[in-house]
Image (cartoon, grey):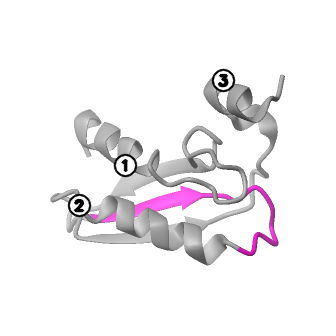
Amino acid sequence: MNEELKENIMGALELVVDPELGVDIVNLGLVYNVEMDEEGKVTVTMTLTSMGCPLAGTIVDQVKRALADIPEIKDVDVNIVFNPPWNKEMMSRYAKIALGIR
């Protein structure tokens, strides 16, 4: 995957907002990796802010919808992982400001 496509994918993922925190999953640091195979299948490896997140299904659906309009992408798989565990240090400066975290 070229850098421009990766930027487009990450930009689309910035439209996916964590419903509990009101900040997008990219700036929260929840997206760990994005890969695409030769057939156009994208695998988004990400985590959630907590293991028992009741909105996991909603977030996965939003990720798939956000990437559906990118023509190079034929299929999307969302791989939820909990290692490494998410922590607030993974957030961007923007997310920390939005949430009032120093």
- Amino acid type indicated by mark 2: Asp
Q: Is residue 2 magenta?
A: no
Q: Which mark is residue 93?
A: 3
Residue at 80 percent across and 43 percent down: it is 87
Q: CA distance from mark 2 to mark 3?
A: 28 Å
Q: In the image, is residue 67 above or below residue 96?
A: below
- Amino acid type indicated by mark 1: Ala
Secondary structure type for disc 2 = loop
What residue span does the magenta drawing correspond to? Answer: 41-54
Q: Which mark is residue 101?
A: none
Residue 23, position as x, y percentages in the image: 62, 44
Q: CA distance from mark 1 to mark 2?
A: 9 Å
Query: Quick check: marks 1 and 3 in contact, CB under 8 Å?
Result: no
Residue at 15 percent across and 59 percent down: it is 71
- Amino acid type indicated by mark 3: Arg
Q: Nearer the viewer, residue 73 or 12?
A: 12
Residue 81, position as x, y percentages in the image: 67, 63
* Category of crowding for the residue at label 1, using alpha-carbon neighbours closer than 10 angstroms: few (below 14), some (14–19), many (at least 20): some
Residue 4, position as x, y percentages in the image: 24, 35
Q: Earlier in the sequence, mark 1 or mark 2?
A: 1
Query: Quick check: marks 1 and 2 in contact, CB under 8 Å?
Result: yes
Residue at 47 percent across and 59 percent down: it is 44
